[in-house]
Amino acid sequence: MKKLLAIVFAAMLLLTACGSKEESENSGVYDPYSEPPETYWSDYAKTTRTDGFYYSSSAEVNGSSRDRLRYVDFRTGLDVVVCSKPNCLHKSSDCGSIGIIGTVVQYEDKIYWFENNYAALDDEGNFYSSTDLWRADLDGTNRLKVSGIDDKITGCSNFIVHDGKLWICAKKESFNEYGVNLRENENWLYSYDFSSGEMKSEFLLTSGKDASAYIDGVFNDKLYYSGNHAREAFCYDFETGETEDLDFGLQGCYDGYLLTFENKTMTDKDFMNVTVLTENGREIDLSGRIGNKDIPYFVVYNDYLIAVNDKVVIDMKTEKGYRLLTKNLTFNGGSAEGYFLAADYEGNYQLLPAEKVIGEEIK
């Protein structure tokens, strides 16, 4: 249910969507010539963006699967391959979109992404791994490795931009001399300063057998994160540098709303007792109104909370409930005014107008 984060302020005037047959037949929501995009959309839900966002999708390039850079424009509804070469088919390694992998972050006029160098033996026979942070122009060109983490980090599972820094949840795994993963994990918070280029290890988030950690988002200048598959919840105060254990579970942090559930045991009953906190201190109690069917998935988008499995939409301003009209879709936060970003289970993405999402009021 939890998925990965990042910030996007896109400028489509700086991009040129290539005039290939592939793009001319694109409906504006999905590229039928590529495989379903493999990305974690909730990462984008935790960020502030105005015009759209970048992401990396899987495509067939020179007979093999490669990642390539794409962009969704909220103003036009178009989903296009990012490339500055006229008449490019985006299917060879010399295309500017090819080779940018994973979650893509935009900060000012650059995009950033991580590349993981998976475990290998060093010169002394010790097992190691590392992760590099790369930067490029908005069209994917002028790529440069700007920093890295070498402390046996096997992956940066998710991250978010706040106050001029990239805050990163990085996993450190343990291996024996034969390269077998011992499953003893440490999850660390790192920060990367966009101005100075400094990569800094902040503190240990969680550790232990199969330990996990996840950054839920920033709320009232505090970083909220969870561990051990959401059974533990914490917040880090940027101003004081103090970390607090929370007595509630975290559902997510979207567009100025913090979604919590009653406690940490993660039973079906707990998920029903949902409370939404707003940045001005208001609490919205949704106990019994959502979380009643299957594993809940909630997201707040344009001041509406969408409970996908419950097929319910709740207006956060009025607290009124409405029928969710669409089926078999997952929704993702953002700031496309009047539209909702959604994906079906096959990875087909679309911007839906409000009238196709919000139905009659539930009395």
Image (tube, rainbow, N blue to C red):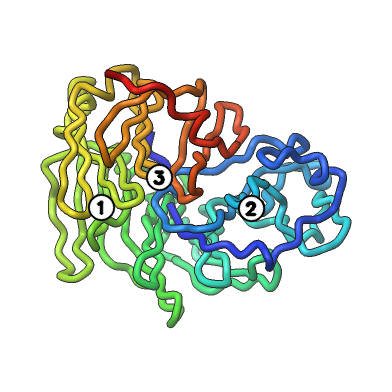
| Relative to 193, residue 133 above or below | above
Which residue, given by chain and number where applicable, does mark 1 sit on?
224
Residue 228 seen: no
Name the residue: 42% across, 58% down: 48
Between tags 3 and 1, which lies in front?
3
Q: Position of residue 113 (x, y in %)?
A: 54, 60
| Relative to 123, residue 175 above or below | above
Which residue, given by chain and number where applicable, does mark 2 sit on?
71
Q: Position of residue 225 (x, y in %)?
A: 27, 50
Going by the numbered disc 1, the residue's amino acid type is Tyr
Name the residue: 41% across, 71% down: 192
**How far is the residue under mark 3 from the one under mark 1?**
21 Å
**How far is the residue under mark 2 from the one under mark 3?**
20 Å
Q: Helix, strand or loop at disc 3?
A: loop
Which residue, given by chain and number where applicable, does mark 3 sit on?
302
Instruction: Say which quadrant the C terminus sits in.
Output: top left
Q: Position of residue 328 (x, y in %)?
A: 51, 22
Q: Helix, strand or loop at disc 2?
A: strand
Position of residue 21 in the picture relative to residue 42 (left or right): right
Name the residue: 53% across, 56% down: 116
Q: Helix, strand or loop at disc 1?
A: strand
Task: Tell which circle, 2 or 3, labels the residue nearer the N-terminal end.
Answer: 2
Instruction: Say which quadrant the N terminus sits in.
Output: top left
Going by the numbered disc 2, the residue's amino acid type is Tyr
Q: Position of residue 313 (x, y in %)?
A: 36, 29
Decide which of 21, 268 is in the foreground and name it: 21
Decide which of 353, 331 is in the foreground and name it: 353
